[in-house]
Amino acid sequence: MKKFKIIAFTHKTTDINDIGKFHVEDALVKERFETLKKAFNLDELLYLSTCNRVEFLISSNQKVDSLFLKKFFVAFDSNWSANDVDWAIKNAQVFEGDAALRHLFSVASSIDSLVVGEREIITQVRNAYEKCNALNLTGDLIRLAVKKTIEVAKDVYTHTNISKNPVSVVSLAYRKLRALNVKQDARFLIIGSGVTNTTMAQYLKKHKFANFTVFNRTLANAEKLASDLNGKAFPLSELANYNGGFDIIVTCTGSAESIITPALYKRLVGDDKAKKVVIDLAIPNDLDAEILNNYDVNLIAINNLQTVAKENLLAREQEMDSCKAIIDANIDDFKQILKTRKVELAMSEVPKKVKEIRETANEVFAKELNNLDVESKQVLDKILAYMEKKYISVPMKMAKDILIEDAKTK
């Protein structure tokens, strides 16, 4: 367990606008993290990035101290200044061993989320693992940790009220939108077709909104979402040429800079003087703050939702003890899983060794075997095959029984 470490940046310790500094474009993930893993000789690496947190899951015997962090952040982004690196070191939370596992369980169970009870995080953890695993960044330890993490999160959601009447960032934004008494024929511009915007679009569709135009860097993804909404799709590069008007913008992209600049907004709004609504769920924000000084805009952004999130936390505090009890029990269970896995890996050589012994025996007793008739040879082969099977299974069963008994006595 000591090899398992997490370097985290969350809304609890870091301004969520600054967390955007850690955003890595999808096309660059493979190159950036393969280089990072190799540079630090890490056994495993997983990168989790959401709208309000970034987590680096690491398997390594190295000590994650300030010196390691400095080298790590310099390697993470060579364009960072010394001030950026110092900022990252200051804001980084480092977890190791049991504490790292507890933190990961808490993240996936949403008790560490911006909005407590937000189920979306469990999908984000799973997707982050699948992406990094496909890039050969992860291995056995992180695989087992993530598998157990998902089980724990489901257990928490099932046996506590932490997710009763769940309020995610998206649902909070939607509730604020509904409070504005928006008309059903409102024209929506949806910029970005990732998980967050897709979830928001489903809310809108469910409540009978039907006028959608979707923009996305990859046109195929825009078309997929637009098809589900019976709307229109365009590549993001065409946004500046759009003249169909809008009442509401829903935006969430992975851009490191503002997508909606003052000049772009001016072209989009044209001569329309009506008050507009912008739902900006991106980190960093997609909407340039200068726009708010020159236009009548009702902005709904993640920053605005933090107060409500804190209220939710207070309302659900009574569930925390139950959640933590489940997490603590599963930490002990995971340690047992790791012990069993170590035995499995150690025993994986047994079949090979048994076969080698059998082959050696055939050579040693070759003369005697040649003197046997066909039927006797067949019987002997069956006996050896049976014994070979037992020699493989019995030690494994005995080892597991010892581990189980050892766990019971603790």
Image (tube, rainbow, N blue to C red):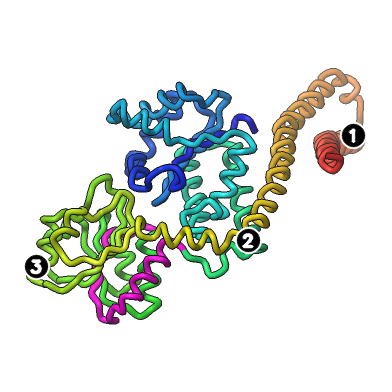
Q: Which labelled disc corresponds to residue 265? A: none
In the image, is residue 186 part of the stretch drawn in magenta?
yes
Kindly state the secondary structure of the residue where label 3 is placed: loop
How far apart are the two marked residues, 3 and 2, measured between alpha carbons?
A: 51 Å
For label 3, count other residues whose C-alpha is less than 10 Å away and answer few (under 14), some (14-19) or many (20+).
few
User: At x 61% / y 61%, what residue is drawn?
Assistant: 157
**Residue ID for mark 3:** 270
Q: Nearer the viewer, mark 3 or mark 2?
A: 2
Q: Which residues are magenta?
A: 168-195
**Residue ID for mark 2:** 318
Q: Amino acid at mark 2?
A: Gln
Q: Nearer the viewer, mark 2 or mark 1?
A: 2
* 199 over 9 or under it: above or below: below
User: At x 7% / y 70%, what residue is drawn?
Assistant: 271
Q: Could you tell me if the residues under marks 3 and 2 are in contact, i.e. CB atoms within 8 Å? A: no
> With 404 as the anchor, is 262 left or right in this view?
left
User: Percent x, y for residue 136?
Assistant: 48, 37
Residue situated in front as seen by the camera: 153 or 127: 153
* 334 over 33 or under it: above or below: below
Q: Earlier in the sequence, mark 3 or mark 1?
A: 3
Q: Which labelled disc corresponds to residue 380? A: 1
User: Percent x, y for residue 152?
Assistant: 64, 53
User: At x 11% / y 72%, what residue is drawn?
Assistant: 272
User: Percent x, y for residue 127?
Assistant: 47, 51
Q: Earlier in the sequence, mark 2 or mark 1?
A: 2
Q: Is residue 119 visible?
A: no
Q: Earlier in the sequence, mark 3 or mark 2?
A: 3
